[in-house]
Every structure is written in structure tokens, then in C-alpha cells.
Amino acid sequence: MHPLAWLAQRDLGLAALRRGGRSAIVMPALFALGDKVLTNADIATFAAFGAFAMLLLVDFGGPMRERLQAQVGLAIVGGVFICIGTLTSRSAWLAAVTMAVVGFGALFAGVVSSVLAGATTALLLSLILPITVKAPNSAIPDRLAGWGLASAASLLAISVLWPAPVRHPLRGPAAAACRALAVQLRNDVAYLLKEPGGPTKAEHEAVFEGAEEALNGLQKTFLATPYRPTGLSTSARTVVRLVDELNWLRIVLASVHNVEGVTVNQASCVVKRCAAEVLDEAAAVLENSSPSTSRAHELRASLAGLDRALTAMEHNATMELPVRRVTAGTATADGGAVDLEGGVTEVITSLDPSFRAQELSFAVTLIGGNVELLDGAERRTWWQRWLGRQPKGLSGTASVVQERAAAHVDPHSVWLHNSIRGAVGLGLAVLIANLSGVQHAFWVVLGMLSVLRSNALNTGQNVLRGLLGTVAGFVIGAGIIELVGTSQTVLWFLLPVAILLAGVAPAAISFAAGQAAFTLTLVILYNIIAPAGWRVGLLRVEDIAIGCAVSLVVGVLFWPRGAAAALRLALSEAYTDTSTYLANAVAFGMLRCDATSPEAPAPTDDAIRAAAAGRRLDDAFRGYLAERGAKPLPLAEVTRLVTAVAGLRLGGDAVLDLWQREQGSSVGDRSAARQELISTSALIRTWYEDLALSLSSGRQLREPLPHDPVADGRLIDAVRHDLADEDGHASSTAVRMIWTADHLDAARRLQSAVAGPARNAVKMASEDPRGWATWFDRHLPRKLAGVEQL
């Protein structure tokens, strides 16, 4: 196989080669400028490591303008960290405390934005280097000069040295998913109506499989990074919402995929076709790299068409109900449900297609609305961007930062765990390096940072790999030094090659190979600065060993359980919060359905808590996927547990939207209907709370709730006054009540999909001898003080 083809298979898009190539050109040039031309060791060192940090350790995505902005931000913050590190470097204890505090801030800030998360290691390097290399305050100007040279060179390099193509990792897969779902909707209608030339059963199934494949591709891309791929830019925030919404639309469509025997409802078919138009127009906007006014107009027109079709369908639903059969039904002996052989079954059956269409239209409207926001954000002028003006309906950057940070100010947050563990490890490594008097404290801290993982087992695995790679790099470097001696000319020629290998090896070969190449680079670099032969490599092995030991100790003390336990706990909290939100959305609707009842506020706080739990779950799931080692529970089952949470939350959004469009009327007494729906929602909420308790403590999970046709009868009987008005037609309030019951039934049906995976997860955890409770669970309450205020 050709070397480039081999590399392309392991280095997607040749991103690592691009970073390594740039660094191999820029880093030696800056080092030569500082060392040979300016003859200033501080400038040379900080210019070289600055180039390493800003070209090899980060690779910002998006348009070039956004990449340059992120690079400038990294340069400014890095300069501040250099000043802080230098000012505190001469006191061992002050340096350790500063490293821990500032390190925690840098690590935790990544939760706000994927841009910050991707730059965390580079930011930490800008603090580790000055805080571990002691110097007087007078060294700050020279250090900043070196960092400034590296910053200017990095801006130039990413602009002209093999510029990376514009990357919107989610837009392409999201557009493909929209197209595939639009095809599926049209295909469903044609198959259901038995249109001439329509699809056969095999063709119908093939279209469904194609949509599933497109959605799986989107999900795979979404989960491919160790952090949620969303920055603070408006377009990044809107695109990432599409993932949950498209997955929920998948659940909605899958529930009625087998359309044979389903009652044909012409109005519902019109809604499906209009929804397909919205999805097609949304895909066109996502595929268009430059904002288009005409595309935006087409998308808005298709959304308006969907809204009109939904309104007409809701009107038809009230006009076509078999109300006389319902009112003629016979009550049961206890005065409860009407005769099931009478009107109940017919009413529920007749409303089912319209409910599915209403559920579908809500999901598609969310998708189209988000894409419309994205288009509006990208069509802003530079002046509007500079002022931070957001499209109508989207929160500002400051409120988004507060919301995302507050979501993780929780003792069970994986991101908080990682930040605390990393900060303690960094501070401890600085303290040990300073108190032990090692020659290169910098490598002790960097060694700790490079191998710390989510649990002690994986930290131990990376310790072994890191040490083996370091030893290999030392042996190779020692052999080179033995062959060429300390000849400066040869070492200068070898330096770019070593840097290129250090950039490519981690992606193309392994973590250990990257450590070996990095060690070789440092052996060469330090022999250029101060020729010392092979001893430089030996000192690096010793320093890395100390840093790895610190990492292992911190991993054991702070989180010995690993990502699987954190994922179970995050699932537990997410199911609790989302089921609470769904139940409270139903309660809100029940108060709003009657004009005589006091107006109730929307459950906004519950929605925020459910969204926050979803973010924590996303981080825990990514940690689980990234963690090495065997995963006994099939990934498909874990994914089902995770995606069901989004389905519950969006179900709550749908109920909320359903009743916010209802003004209420004074017809009849609806207390019985309200009580029926509230009781049903309480049963569903209790089941999901039991599921949450099962995941967090190992408690036996009870069977999913069965369908209760008697409860359907009681609901129909309770709204019988609304099912026939003066003209003999049903009221919109009665239809919304029945649709609310359908949303609850969808949440009930979801129980069967998650019960099996949940039981398997509990079984796997029960076989873990380390038990259920983590240190954080035993010693900290659910919420930290002040979270509610945030």
C-alpha cells in the first residue's frame, strides 16, 4: 500500500499530518530565531513550545475567520497564563495552588464550548511551562515575546500552510438525514394510499433502511469527539440541536412504520407531505455553504405550509370524530368508563393518525425552526456579529455560557469530576516536582497530564504505554546521539523530522509511538540548547515516571469506578429530571384547558433541569465510549438508554407546545379529565423514577406499564361534554386532551424499549465487586449550594 494511502486510512483527512507538517516548519524556524539570531534562551524556548502548543495541540474547525478568532483568543489567554505562571514560579506551594486553581478553570471551561475544550491542553501548556521553569519577574517580557512570535507565526501558518478545508462535521450528515427522512415520509404516504406506480413492500422497507442508515451516520459523527461538538457561535449551537430532534423524529416515524392496516387519513397525509417539504428545504440550507435569501424564503414558506396543514388537520379531527357513538356508549357499573365496544375504541382509532401527524409536525417544525435560526445567524452582517446580536428566538452568548456551566455544577457531573481530578493532579505534580528538586519539573507535570484518564485502571494502562513510549524514544535518541555526537548541524536537520513524527505518530500508530517521537524531539531539542548527550533522555524517563505515578495516585483516590458507573448515574438523573418535566408539562396543560382555572406558569425550570441532565448524560456517554477496555453491555443497548432520555424530554416539549396553543374555553366541567391525565402521568413518572433508582442502586426494575383500555374509556367518558358541542362536533380542547394521553402512551411504550437494556446494565453492575456508590455519591448531596441561583 502506498504510504499516503496507509496514512489516510488512519489519519482522517490527514489532519495529523497537516498539524505535524506545519509544526515541523514553524517550530524549528522560531527556535533558530530565538536561539541563534536573538541569542535569548527564554525567547527561543517559549517560541518553540508556543508553536508546539498552537499548531500541534489544537486544530480549530469552522470557517477561516472563526479559526483565526479562536487562535487569537488562545494567544491572549496563553499570554496571561505565562504572566501568572512566572509570578508564582519561585514559591513551591504558591505555584502548586496556582496550578490547581487555574488548571481547574481551564479544564472546566471546556464544558462551555468545544472550541475551549479542544484548546485545553494548549492552554495548560502555556501555564505549565512558566510555572515549572523558575525565573524572576524580569523574565516575563522575554517569555511573552517568544509566545508572541509563536502566536503570529501560528496565525500565518494556519492561513497559508496547507489551510484546512472548512469543516462543519454535523451539517453534512444532518442534511443527509433530513433528505432521507423526507423521502421516507413521501414513500409512506404513497405506500399507504396505494398510489399508481407507488413503492412495493420491498421498496418501502428499503427506503426505511436508508433513513436509518443516514441517522446512524449522523449519530456516529456526533459521538466521534470526546466532547459535545458545539461552540458558542450561533450556527454551532443550532446545528447540534438537530441531532436530538432528528433522532426523536426517527422514534416517531418508527412507531408507525408498519403502515399496513392503518386508517387512511387524508389530512394526515397532507401534513406528512408538507413535513417532507420542510425537511427538504432544511437540507438545502444545511448543504449551502453560503447564506441564501431565496433558500431562507423557501424554508419559511414550507414551515408556513406545514402550519396550515396542521391547523386544517386539527379542525378535521374535531369535525370527523364519531361523537354520537361515544355519547351513546354505556357506562360501566361503577360509573367509570364508557362501553369499550361502543365509542372508545372508535374514538381512539380515529384520532390516532391525526395524533401521529401532530407529533410529526411538531418534530419537523423544531428542525425547520433551528435551521432557520442557523440561516439567520449566518446572514448577519459583521457589525451585528460584533455586537453579539442574535436571531430572534435564540439566547445570547452570556446566557448560554451561564446555562452550560450551571448544568455541570453538580457533584455527579463527569466533567466536574475530570476537572477536579485534573486540577488536583496538576497541583500535586508541581508540588512534588519542586520539592523533590528534579532537573526538569516541566516533564513531571506534562507526564501526569498526558496519562490521566477516567479511572485508575485506564490510567494504569496509559502509564505503561507512556513509559514504554518514553523509554523507546530515549533509546532511539541515545542511539542517534551516539552516532552523530552533539553535532549541531545534524541535530538541526533531524529536529523537523522528529517534530513531524511527534505530530503524526499518535494518530497513525499509537499513544506510545507518539510518546516515543515526542521524547526523541526533546532529546534533540535539549542537546541543541545545552549539549548533554543521552543523559537528557534518561532524565525525561525519570520525570515522566514521577508524573505518571502522580496521575495513577490521583486516579485511584478520586474516581476508581470508571465511566460505566458514571454513565449509570447520569442516566438515573436524566430519567428522573425528564420524567418530572413531562409530568409537569401535562399538569400545565390541564390547568390551561379551562378558562375558569387560574393561569399556571410554564414549567420552564423543569425544562432547564431536564436539558442540563441531558448535557451531563452526553458527557458521561462520551467518556464511556472513549474509555478503553471491554464493554459487556452491547453499545446498541446503551445508545437506546441514552436516546430515550431525549425522546422523553422532547415529548415534554411537545405537550407544552400543544397546550400553549390552546386558549381554553368554559365548556363543561373538565376536572375528571384533568384528574385522569394527571394520574396517568404520575404512573409513568413513577415508573421512570423506579428505573432511575434501579440504575443508581441496583434495585430490581418492575415490568413496564401495560396498556390500559379501561383508562382510555374513563378519559373519553370524562370529556364527553366536550366531544359534542352545539353543532354536534368535538371541541379542540377534547382533542388536545386525547392527544396528551397519546403523548403519555408514547412515553409508556418507550418503557418496553429501555427496560431490557436497563436490566442488563444493572446485572453487569451487580457483578462489579466495587459496589455502586462513588466517593462523590457518598459524601456530596445531589446539588451544590447556589446551583438553583445559577
Image (cartoon, rainbow, N blue to C red):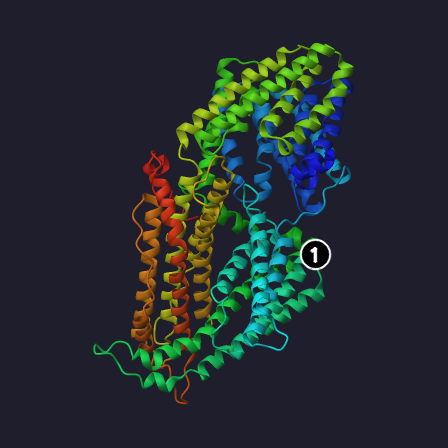
**Relative horizontal placement of residue 554, taking residue 340 as reference (left or right):** right
> In terms of depth relative to the viewer, which is nearer, 717 or 656?
717
**Relative horizontal placement of residue 396, taking residue 727 as reference (left or right):** right
- In this rendering, the answer to whether 421 lies above or below 169 is above
Residue 94 visible somewhere in the drawing: no
* Residue drawn 73% across the image and 28% down it: 24
Question: Where residue 730 appears, x then y in whole percent?
Answer: 41, 82
* Quarter residue 485 falls in: top right
Question: Where residue 210 appears, x then y in whole percent?
Answer: 59, 59
**Helix, strand or loop for disc 1:** loop
Question: Where residue 680 appears, x then y in whole percent?
Answer: 32, 65
Query: What's the amino acid at mark 1?
Result: Thr
> In this view, which residue lies farthest toward the left?
333
> In terms of depth relative to the viewer, which is nearer, 20 or 631?
631
The quadrant of the rendering that contains the N terminus is: top right
To which residue does mark 1 refer?
A: 381
Question: Where residue 345 appears, x then y in whole percent?
Answer: 36, 77
* Quarter residue 772 falls in: top left
- In this rendering, the answer to whether 392 lies above or below 463 is below
**Relative horizontal placement of residue 721, taking residue 563 as reference (left or right):** left
